[in-house]
Amino acid sequence: MLSFITLAISTMLYQNPQAPVEERVEDLLGRMTLEEKVGQMNQCVGVEHFRSNMGTLTEEDLLTNTAQAFYPGLVPEDLLKLTREGKIGSFLHVLTVEEANQLQREAMKSRLAIPIIFGIDAIHGNANAPDNTVYPTNIGLACSFDTDMAHKIARQTAREMRAMNMHWTFNPNVEVARDPRWGRCGETFGEDPLLVTRMGVEQVKGYQGNLDSENDVLACVKHFVGGSQPENGTNGAPFDCSERTIREVFFPPFKAGVDAGALSLMTSHNEVNGVPAHTDPWLMTDVLRGEWGFKGFVVSDWYDIEHVHDLHRTAENNKEAFYQSVMAGMDMHMHGPEFTDAVVELVREGRIPESRIDESVRRILRVKFALGLFENPYADEKTTMDVRLCDEHRNTALEAARNSIVLLKNDGLLPLKRGRYKKILVTGINADDENILGDWSAQQKRENVSTVLDGLRAADPSAEFVFVDQGWDPRNMDRAKVNEAARAAADADLCVVVAGEYMMRYRWADRTCGEDTDRSDIDLVGLQNELIRRVAASGKPTLLVLINGRPLGVEWAAENLPAIIEAWEPGMTGGRAIAEIIYGDVNPSAKLAITIPRSVGQTRMIYNHKPSMYFHPVVVTPSTPLYPFGHGLSYNTYEYSNLRLSEKTIGTDGSTVVSVDVTNRGKRDGVEIVQLYIHDCYAQTTRPVKELKDFRRVALAPGETRTVEFTVGPDQLRYLDRKMNPIVEPGDFTIMAGPSSEDDKLLKTTLTVE
Ligand code: GLC
């Protein structure tokens, strides 16, 4: 009995897992000093990350680098001391379970033993750390239009993260990508607000579950807002956009993520109409809290509060920037110890009320309690690899890759018949390289990566694959190697050129695509076009496979080659999935989640443009995309017929069922992604020529016809009137269903709203 009483006395309320979270939060908050409170609002990079950069980066580099850092004046071990003092509440860029547990042990020595929450960019699996399953990146996942898969990948990623003591992913990126020059298109779910919304919602649910077990992690919807439409295509450039477009295009995926329960959100690098997002109370307080009721916490992006001073120059020093940001609604600083001392000072000076600090600390502690970090602060190093890279997850990655790869063009060359081509040339920078993993990937063990060459050799052991290695670096290709490929082509029966971009982060400055890697062009870099033309000049059938994050305007190939596959960044099983599609073991089904323009000059080219966009098309070159949103071929052909409405006329609060028959006219089982678009024929404000309002993956056997049904009601018809109020107004709407956003492929009918 006595020991029980002793235990009860020594266990403070906040340490009692049976107590309600709110009581634990209040009990703990009441015990914290101001320093400890502000410490919870501060995040730092891990000790090993610090150590690896302190010798290589300069302080000058720190001003513009958004992925590597150290803290001048400190040594890595200082982070352990600050942790023991309770001055760090979170770490990022910790890449091993051993280091995470070590840092956690230091935190548990602090006066109140508040555990660290470890954040990491687990964007497509926990790929940013070695020895984890690497799934296709978000753009490929979006091209599958498979929201269940999005959920499943997030669920599996959460399990792999917790196995290495990671608790918080800085994902889903729910930005609507509208500029192919921007290097991060591959990290997004593309250009359509509905598709981005649905993918983001399923990932939030998949990551967080009920946020109450050691298989759940905290999701983070990012970047709020507008980083995906930077003024000149470069990451962090100004976002100048009407409130109407912000509310109709960019906000919906964030609001849906918040409604789905996301308990963290990351603000964007950029200014929004003149105000840095990181100090904008309209975003972080009025909209996020006032309109949407967000209950989680807001984390800054990398040094972006400091950039309010040194870049946006709306604060005369970092302390002012911290003041503005916290008062606008910022809850956690990414990253570095300067924040803690400055904010403590601001509270002591009476400029920031301690009650404002308490708000942020409550939001952060709630999540730490919910995640069970006080009870389970560590991961088991002995069993960490039981779930990471397990067969179940690898199989999911393969299925996702198969469904993410878009067949852009095929004049009948594909699928290849085994034995038909005896000698096959394989060449190109991405033919046999780990770059297939994509952006936000660390190097993975070679045996865990299936390159295109690996996949082809496994798919057709009867063929002789002649590999001419062009190296990995598009900027430094060797013309002698291009010549060698041209000669080999003459001697081959078929040629496969695997081109695209370079994304691997460990060669940060050599990349051509990815974070902070934006371009003024969307053509292939280096000698890649020359390689393609020289190989094709052999007269042998030449297949182009692309591995890339941003859309690429491969116009010559589109006009001159028999087949093109857009594989995006398919992840560690990518080579196998690509080969299975080439040989027809898999019938491709993916469709473009983002427009592929012919050239950068066509930017901004989006399918849901306003009617006047091409009122005067440019001269000399076409004003049509190379490949439009929603486009993707199969080895079947699918026929659409019999589009009809259950009600041709409805009231403003009514709805109708749209039905369309889809028939598989091919000889193979397949999946067709049926798309539903609407156009508001006349409205108070200009409306997009079409807007995706629903989609469905439909499996069809050869000859099978399925009737696909969609509901169209207020949620699909609503838009913002001149006063920005959501309305459903009487009038005619064109209802369209078909295989892509291409007008001449869509069946159309009219719905009248009275
Ligand atoms: C970067 C990115 C952000 C990422 C963060 C941590 O600057 O903008 O998406 O989560 O830093 O890596």
Image: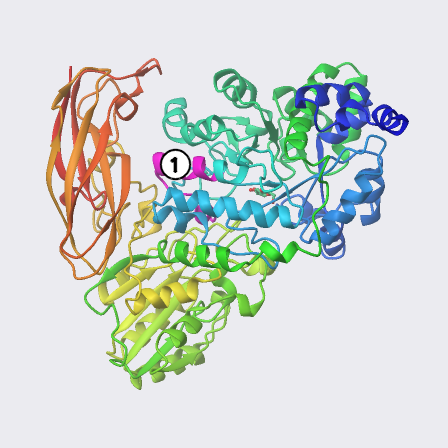
Which corner quadrant holds the C terminus?
top left
Q: Nearer the viewer, residue 296 or 267?
A: 296
Most extreme residue toward the front is: 1
Quadrant of ligand 1: it is top right
Residue 262's spot in the image, x, y percent? 53, 31
Most extreme residue toward the bottom is: 491
Q: Is 35 situated above or below 614?
A: above
User: What is the crowding at mark 1: few (fewer than 14 residues within 10 Å), some, or many (at least 20)?
Assistant: many
Q: Is 541 covered by the magenta stretch?
A: no
Q: Nearer the viewer, residue 38 or 707?
A: 707
Q: Which residue is mark 1?
A: 198
Q: What residue do we see at 33% from left, 70% from top?
A: 532
Q: Is 182 covered by the magenta stretch?
A: yes
Which corner quadrant holds the N terminus?
top right
- The image quadrant that residue 683 belongs to is top left
Q: Which region is colored magenta?
A: 181-203
Q: Is 429 situated above or below 297?
A: below
**SS majority, magenta:** helix
Q: In this rendering, would 606 be left or right of 482?
A: left
Q: What residue do we see at 17% from left, 32% from top?
A: 658
Q: Secondary structure at mark 1?
A: helix
